[in-house]
């Protein structure tokens, strides 16, 4: 099925929009470095689009750059430390070339505001809702000194901007469907760095997805901090609404040969409607990233997650009832304020019970200004945090390996996304369940679907062959 290019008037003109960076060495050069989550990766693509329109061209090294932008993350202290390390590197470059403009954008810009502004190496500080202002900020920084814009918005969704895709594979792309977060999990800095939740107009999401499909993309990843609370209300008719299940269906219907993925789901908001929609469309990948954060209800309560161990497990049971082949992955924090050995063991036992296909595991890092930093003591020692983190990583590695072993002998449809880092003749792709497969190329190319059979595995990879 061809993408329906006629649904929205604007699209006919947009068919000609370039989704790739325009490389032009005669133009002013911008170098963009991105840290943090997928949302930040997509934001950098929005930023490049805005800067291309203002006459900039992307370059691939700081030495060539007239403007360096570092898109930052504040989620944990070590994420911020890495950025400070990069600013030291940029400072050396700026000493060589004083005309070089250095901008810090993203979550750390929003969180640290004046502190960053006062850093000698930084010329521009721009928060996540200030990217339309970047051309002005850059121009002003060139002539009038340092610039800052960290105003958060209740409306900004960059809906009309076509992100310029910086990835090289041209197969898989992100679409941000909402911005901000209203949840205020007590440990989390995101509501402070990204502001209030707002849902993007569905028409503009579909238009962007159709444009990607028309340009040969084969996988669309819908992004939001809590996709399940996506809700668009028509400003002219409040009875006309679109929720996440409906949006997912609309994107899935664009082209059945294009995969649709999404993250992140919130256990308190993920309803059965989304699960039934997933089950109904073969191109919505059966994988749910469902962060649990802790397996202990009292800890979940202090985290302000608004669900219990039991209600989380009920959600997992429902996913498996509706979609028995659905992969489930998670995020977890160990060593949160007041976490006892018994709380920690409850998290381990939940991991044993759910048997996740993968997990991002962290120890708690106190973030200034959050509810946890104000109300609770960060009382688990670094030594215990590290010990608990190593313990849960070891447990999950074993479970991932065991889950992967169950795939041996089975066949999966894989979308080829790249070549293997180790061997040029081998390709890499993912199963619908988001498991990474490596297999000999046999003449196949990036962007194709192939059927593979799994021969062996590690805890992270399925070693396969094309059948
Ligand atoms: N919106 C998503 C994830 C946002 S941040 C959600 O609700 O799950 C990604 C992950 O970072 C979180 O799921 C959490 O596991 C982790 N994280 C957030 N704040 C943290 C902190 N202060 N210390 C350690 N890990 C943290
Ligand atoms: Fe942070 Fe919670 Fe919002 Fe996720 S849902 S971004 S963890 S506040
Ligand atoms: Fe993402 Fe980090 Fe901000 S995880 S939302 S870039 S704090």
Image: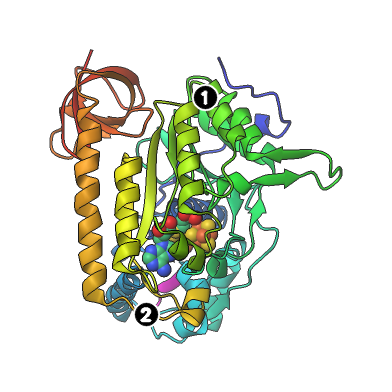
Q: Is residue 103 magenta?
A: yes
Q: Is residue 46 visible?
A: yes
Category of crowding for the residue at label 1, using alpha-carbon neighbours closer than 10 angstroms: few (below 14), some (14–19), many (at least 20): some
- Closer-to-camera residue (443/432): 432
- Closer-to-camera residue (162/415): 415
Please name the residue shown 49% across and 73% down the image. 109
Instruction: Please state the horizontal and vertical placement of residue 232, each as a whole percent of the image.
Output: 72, 45
Q: Is residue 69 visible?
A: no
Q: Any mark on residue 98, and which?
A: 2
The quadrant where residue 238 appears: top right
- Going by the image, does 283 lie left or right of 230? left
- Closer-to-camera residue (410/322): 322
Category of crowding for the residue at label 2, using alpha-carbon neighbours closer than 10 angstroms: few (below 14), some (14–19), many (at least 20): few
- The image shows residue 406, relative to residue 357, as above or below, that is above
What kind of element bears circle 1? helix
Please name the residue shown 42% across and 50% down the image. 24
The CA distance from mark 1 to mark 2 is 57 Å
Instruction: Please state the horizontal and vertical placement of residue 5, each as a whole percent of the image.
Output: 64, 24
Magenta residues, as a range? 98-104
Instruction: Please state the horizontal and vertical placement of residue 363, each as a whole percent of the image.
Output: 31, 66
What kind of element bears circle 2? loop
| Residue at numbered disc 1 | 279
Please name the residue shown 84% across and 40% down the image. 239
Q: CB at mark 1 closer than 8 A to ligand 1?
A: no
């Amino acid at each position: 099925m061809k993408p329906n290019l006629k649904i929205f008037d604007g699209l006919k003109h947009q068919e000609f929009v370039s989704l790739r960076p325009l490389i032009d060495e005669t133009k002013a050069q911008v170098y963009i470095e991105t840290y943090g989550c997928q949302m930040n990766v997509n934001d950098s693509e929005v930023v490049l689009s805005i800067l291309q329109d203002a006459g900039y061209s992307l370059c691939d090294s700081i030495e060539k750059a007239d403007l360096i932008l570092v898109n930052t993350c504040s989620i944990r202290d070590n994420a911020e430390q890495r950025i400070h390390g990069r600013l030291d590197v940029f400072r050396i470059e700026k000493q060589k070339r004083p005309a070089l403009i250095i901008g810090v954008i993203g979550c750390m810009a929003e969180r640290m505001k004046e502190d960053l502004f006062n850093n000698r190496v930084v010329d521009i500080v721009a928060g996540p809702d200030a990217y339309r202002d970047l051309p002005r900020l850059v121009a002003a920084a060139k002539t009038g000194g340092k610039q800052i814009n960290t105003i958060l918005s209740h409306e900004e969704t960059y809906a009309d901007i076509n992100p310029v895709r910086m990835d090289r594979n041209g197969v898989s792309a992100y679409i941000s469907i909402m911005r901000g977060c209203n949840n205020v999990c007590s440990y989390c800095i995101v509501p402070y760095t990204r502001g209030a939740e707002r849902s993007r107009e569905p028409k503009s999401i579909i238009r962007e997805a159709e444009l990607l499909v028309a340009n040969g993309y084969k996988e669309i990843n819908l992004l939001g901090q809590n996709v399940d609370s996506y809700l668009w209300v028509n400003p002219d008719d409040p009875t006309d609404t679109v929720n996440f299940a409906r949006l997912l269906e609309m994107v899935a219907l664009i082209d059945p040969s294009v995969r649709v993925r999404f993250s992140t789901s919130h256990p308190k908001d993920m309803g059965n409607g989304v699960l039934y929609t997933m089950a109904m469309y073969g191109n919505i990948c059966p994988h749910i990233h469902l962060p649990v954060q802790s397996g202990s209800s009292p800890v979940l309560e202090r985290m302000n997650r608004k669900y219990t161990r039991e209600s989380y497990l009920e959600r997992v049971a429902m996913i498996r009832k509706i979609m028995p082949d659905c992969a489930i992955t998670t995020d977890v924090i160990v060593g949160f304020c007041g976490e006892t050995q018994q709380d920690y063991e409850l998290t381990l036992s939940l991991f044993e019970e759910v048997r996740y296909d993968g997990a991002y595991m962290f120890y708690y890092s106190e973030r200034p200004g959050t509810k946890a930093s104000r109300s609770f003591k960060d009382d688990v020692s670094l030594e215990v945090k590290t010990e608990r983190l190593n313990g849960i990583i070891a447990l999950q590695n074993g479970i991932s390996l065991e889950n992967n072993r169950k795939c041996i002998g089975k066949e999966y449809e894989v979308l080829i996304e790249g070549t293997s880092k180790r061997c040029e003749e081998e390709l890499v792709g993912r199963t619908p369940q988001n498991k990474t497969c490596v297999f000999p190329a046999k003449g196949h190319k990036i962007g194709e679907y192939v059927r593979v059979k799994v021969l062996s595995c590690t805890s992270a990879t399925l070693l396969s062959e094309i059948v």
